Image (spheres, rainbow, N blue to C red):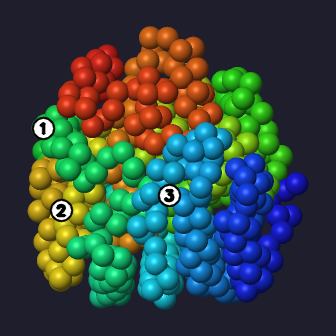
Amino acid sequence: MKFKDFKYERPDMNKFQNEFNGLVQRFSDAGSADEQLAIVKEINTMRNHMESLSQIVQIRHTIDTTDAFYDAENDFIDGAMPLYMEMVDKYYRALDTSKFKDALRKELGDHIFNIIEVKLKTFHPDIIEDLKQENMLASKYTKLRTSAKIMFDGKELNLAQMVPYYESKDRLVRKEAQEAATKFFEENEAAFDNLYQDLVEVRHKIARKLGFDNFVKLGYMRLSRTDYDDKMVAAYRKQVLDELVPLSLELRKRQEERLRVDTIKYYDEQIGFTTGNATPKGDSAWIVENGKIMYEELSAETGEFINFMLDSELMDLEAKKGKSGGGYCTYISDYRAPFIFSNFNGTSGDIDVLTHEAGHAFQCFQSRDYELPEYQFPTLEACEIHSMSMEFLTYPWMERFFKEDVTKYKFNHVSEALLFIPYGVLVDEFQHYVYANPEATPSDRKLKWRELEKKYQPYKNYEDNDFLERGGYWFRQGHIFSDPFYYIDYTLAQVCAFQFFLKSTEDRKEAWDRYLKLCNKGGSLPFTGLLKVAGLDSPFEQGSIKKVIPALRKVLDSIDDRNL
């Protein structure tokens, strides 16, 4: 079945609630563990259906935000999901208090009960209206960002379509492109500030109603972080500051030499070489066809996966008018189908999508036999290991896409991955500041952002751009608005992905076998438990970052980047 044939029908929430609550009551009244497990299967079916409808709406709405039907359905789902969360909360409480809990734990695994322990602290019926408001505000950010109509190069472009100009070989074009995009955010500064202010206020309000001092701890619990806390994250950020910030300065200095400029300016950061960045040597259809060959050759499992994705039309890849920005992978459990959304724009990022988002999708495909929704995807920092590692595990096929520029691509990919981590922890520290200081003003937040840029990206030079110098860059980072505290995850996963990369250069088969084993575990274990399965060092261990740097330096130093 193709994605266009996936059925969406607005759920009758009253009917759904009555049936769901009836199952929860039957579960509580059940006389044996076997009876309860049979009811859990029924509940899983209902949950998977409701969540599938939500995902179908999200996909079709983000593909075309101007579609009136799915715009209205997106608003409906924003309001319905808090009611659904209330039902799941009742179910969790019934599971947690079951007199057959030991038998259930044996059958369902320990981790579902770890998740329940934190999730029970994140919900109360008193916050339903607040959750509806939070959902609607997050959707409002998507609409505001998607509203960008930037006149550039004689065309009306959205933000995703501006990206190729940031990588122009012409320095003036790069500067003008960045200024044009920044102008959109500056002209809408009050709207972005007010929207974020409302989000911070409602999240702080929810946290206080649930008995927390502020949103920080609640934010971690919402993400089902059961095996690490904000103190461990702070210590990890310190590792990044000590080990990777100095390296980032070296990498930018190396970039200055390649570009033959005295100082890297903000509009130079995305261009790696005077000859231009590596770009795919074909159009979207050509990229997909070569991706098909790549995954068929990589393994039997990835071959089955890519043909399922293509046959079912489970990818929407090209940037177009009315389409939401960014990229994501989601999972529609009713159809046992991952879905990849992106905005191809002719840059190397198109290939990164084909590896990164496909890494997520492949994990979902491998985890499709898990009936528990909680086990279909792991927690987000573990999810990102699948995606970021796939970027490296597909290196042997990169010549297909980049041909004579493959070395250029690989050098930039490793270099940019290292440069990304300090930015990722900057985003995280910024969010800790915001939610620990909910009384801060929009001006305070911008000042803090700029202060953190100077800490983690000391090379950042905004030249004469007043808006960015005042700390306005973070308006571009959608995770800050819609997914609080989901960003450090990328950096934790990147440290793990480096380990897979280095292992693949020593023993490719072992690296793939460990990666496949990780994907097959889905979300049945917490983050650190999944690391053990894959034989990976935890990024939280002191020295974990320092340990991978010498080998990565060796990779970069083996390339004469000045002649690329």
Mark 1 vs mark 3, CA separation in Å: 36 Å
Q: Is mark 1 on a helix, strand or loop?
A: helix
| In this view, 365 is above or below 333 | above
Task: Give the residue displayed 46% in from the left and 66% down from the top.
Answer: 120
Res. 307 mark: none
Q: Position of residue 368 (x, y in %)?
A: 71, 44
Mark 1 vs mark 2, CA separation in Å: 24 Å
Q: Which amino acid does label 2 sit on?
A: Tyr
* Dot 2 crowding, Cα within 10 Å, few <14, some 14–19, many 20+: some
- First reached walking from the N terminus: tag 1 or tag 3: 3
Task: Give the residue displayed 43% in from the left and 28% down from the top.
Answer: 532
Task: Give the residue displayed 71% in from the left and 66% down from the top.
Answer: 29
Residue at the top extreme, as displayed: 506
**99 relative position to 493: left or right:** right
User: Circle 2 is placed at which residue position?
Assistant: 462
Q: CB of mark 2 within 8 Å of CB of mark 3? A: no
Q: Position of residue 95 (x, y in %)?
A: 59, 59
User: Circle 3 is placed at which residue position?
Assistant: 116
Instruction: Judge depth for marks 2 and 3 and give the one in front.
Output: 3
The answer to which image quadrant residue 51 occupies is bottom right
**532 relative position to 262: left or right:** right
Instruction: Judge depth for marks 1 and 3 and give the one in front.
Output: 3
**336 relative position to 235: left or right:** right
Mark 2 vs mark 3, CA separation in Å: 46 Å
Q: Is mark 2 on a helix, strand or loop?
A: loop
| In this view, 135 is above or below 23 | below
